[in-house]
Amino acid sequence: VQLQASGGGLVQPGGSLRVSCQASGFRHGYKGIAWFRQAPGKEREGVACIETSDGNTFYADSVKGRFAVSRDDAKDTVYLQMNNLKPEDTAVYYCATDEYPFPCVVVVKSKGTGLDIWGQGTQVTVSS
């Protein structure tokens, strides 16, 4: 089983970017996808999450109203749409999941503690 993150890049402040996380190899489907980010010299931070059971989503306060997480079940892909980007959003963005269902609010607030399956990360740089 694996997660493949993609779509990062360089964007100007106020711009938008969409990153993707494709799941593969899950015999019974993935249980949800959570997004995290880590900037140089800083701790990992929970960003957003979507549960597959009911589509429930959760966002960190720092991105609420600017970021939106969605999924395309036909493609086994979860997207993180990032709007009104700020320089402080610059980080490597990771997606993660687990073989067991998990509540989004817990995994985001715990910065991903307990999640066993992680993608490789994609760099997002917000700079003029």
Image (cartoon, grey):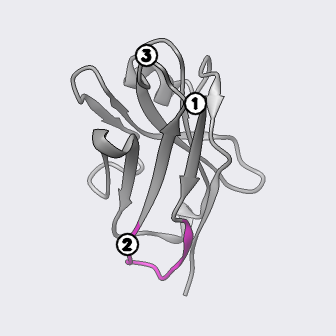
* Image quadrant where residue 70 sits: top left
Quadrant where the image shows the N terminus = top right
Q: Which residue is mark 3?
A: 102
| Residue 59 image position (x, y, % from top left) | 36, 39
**Left/right of residue 99 with respect to residue 91 in the rendered view:** left
Q: Residue at position x 42%, y 14% from top?
A: 101
Which comes sooner in the sequence, label 3 or label 1? 3
Amino acid type at circle 2 is Ser
Disc with the residue nearer the chain's start (2 vs 3): 2
**Is 113 left, or right, of 14 in this rendering?**
right
- Circle 1 is placed at which residue position? 111
Q: Amino acid at mark 3?
A: Phe
The answer to whether residue 13 is magenta is yes
Does residue 11 appear to the left or right of 77 in the view shown? right
Location of residue 55 with respect to 38 vertically, above or below:
above
Residue sitting at the far bottom: 128
Q: CA distance from mark 2 to mark 1?
A: 24 Å
Determine crowd level at label 1: few under 14, some 14-19, many 20+ residues with C-alpha closer than 10 A.
some
On screen, residue 97 above or below 3: above
SS type, badge 1: loop
Q: Position of residue 12 (x, y in %)?
A: 48, 82
Q: Nearer the viewer, mark 3 or mark 1?
A: 3
| Label total for image | 3
Q: Identify residue for label 2.
A: 16
Work out how far the residue at label 2 is from the one at label 3, CA to CA, in angstroms: 29 Å
Residues in magenta?
8-17
Q: Nearer the viewer, residue 16 or 21?
A: 21
- Identify the element where label 2 is drawn: loop
